[in-house]
Image: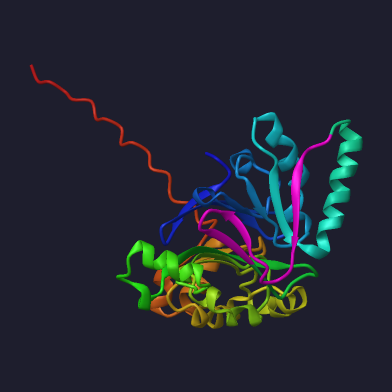
């Protein structure tokens, strides 16, 4: 069985692996984006856009390998989107690897600030936003961007619309439809006030700690504790939510029991764990038939 767990989150295919302090890599292959790179598992190397949430080793260790391996399998240079404060350090890292390996691994390092959109492909944009974690930490929302004709111009002919555009009149308006949000590592914060986060139909959110005694750990490390989760769910009332970054301090079965006690029945229906692998089904052995003489 592959190491990455496959899920469907409100119609979006997710492949990932996430354990706090060990490795986090979460891909949306059909959208051509991977959030964090973990140890660069082979399944995500061909994805063209890497959105790095922050620079901690369990989220970023495979970055150089990701860029290096793409050339070996015939892919174009990858793009790494990250906070601008980390961009120079990552570029130095790649320069050092070039010295060690004796050849350069091409890749585009794109440093951004909060709310500075980057186009992924036609009609698809990623919007970074500040979160409450380490310096240079970002969350990301993937947004379907369309330009539609304004209501007052519906019904006009093509030549009439061309004439209006020549007059400098804007005949279209921008329509944004959030698709998927990944918070990365974070504690509670003002990022939940963003309209595009609140309207996201699919949310990848960390929930690291579940034990009541670990509340202080969550605050100190700026992570989400199960006690915080209801506030997150209130902010995104219509989203399907996938929990990531569970700590090994809490067994998954115990975390599921705690979650069941903490949430309402409605919220339980829309919340699940990334690392809750579906049971592997085995074929029922055939029962040999006996023939009476």
Residue 131 can be seen in this image: yes
Residue 105 percent across, percent down from the top left? 79, 37
| Colouring | rainbow
The residue depicted at 82 percent of the width and 60 percent of the height is: 86
Residue 123 percent across, percent down from the top left? 50, 58
Q: Is residue 85 left or right of residue 225?
A: right
Q: Quadrant of the C terminus?
A: top left
Extent of the magenta region: 104-127
Q: Is residue 57 left or right of residue 194?
A: right
Quadrant of residue 10 within the rendered picture: bottom left
Quadrant of residue 56 within the rendered picture: bottom right
Residue 282 percent across, percent down from the top left? 37, 38
The relative height of residue 106 versus residue 231 in the rendered view (above or below) is above
The residue depicted at 77 percent of the width and 39 percent of the height is: 106
Residue furthest to the top: 293
Asked if the magenta segment contains residue 106, the reply would be yes
The residue depicted at 86 percent of the width and 40 percent of the height is: 97
């Amino acid at each position: 069985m592959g190491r990455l767990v496959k899920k469907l989150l409100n119609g979006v295919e997710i492949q990932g692996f996430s354990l706090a302090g060990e490795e986090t890599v979460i891909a949306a292959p059909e959208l051509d984006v991977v959030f964090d790179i973990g140890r660069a598992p082979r399944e995500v190397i061909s994805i063209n856009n890497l959105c790095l949430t922050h620079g901690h080793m369990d989220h970023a260790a495979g970055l150089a390998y990701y860029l290096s391996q793409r050339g070996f399998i015939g892919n174009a240079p990858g793009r790494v989107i990250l906070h601008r404060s980390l961009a120079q350090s990552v570029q130095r890292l790649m320069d050092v690897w070039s010295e060690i390996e004796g050849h350069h691994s091409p890749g585009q390092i794109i440093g951004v600030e909060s709310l500075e959109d980057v186009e992924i492909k036609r009609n698809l944009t990623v919007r970074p936003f500040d979160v409450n974690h380490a310096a240079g930490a970002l969350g990301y929302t993937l947004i379907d961007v369309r330009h539609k004709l304004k209501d007052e111009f519906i019904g006009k002919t093509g030549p009439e619309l061309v004439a209006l555009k020549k007059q400098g009149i804007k005949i279209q308006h921008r329509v944004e439809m959030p698709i998927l949000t990944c918070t990365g590592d974070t504690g509670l914060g003002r990022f939940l006030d963003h309209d595009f986060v609140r309207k996201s139909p699919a949310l990848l959110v960390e929930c690291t700690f579940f034990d009541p005694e670990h509340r202080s750990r969550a605050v100190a490390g700026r992570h989400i504790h199960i006690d915080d989760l209801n506030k997150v769910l209130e902010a995104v009332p219509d989203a399907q939510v996938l929990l990531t970054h569970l700590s090994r301090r809490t067994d998954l079965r115990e975390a599921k029991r705690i979650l069941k006690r903490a949430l309402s029945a409605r919220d339980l229906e829309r919340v699940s764990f990334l690392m809750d692998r579906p049971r592997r089904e085995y074929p029922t052995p055939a029962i040999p038939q006996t023939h009476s003489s």
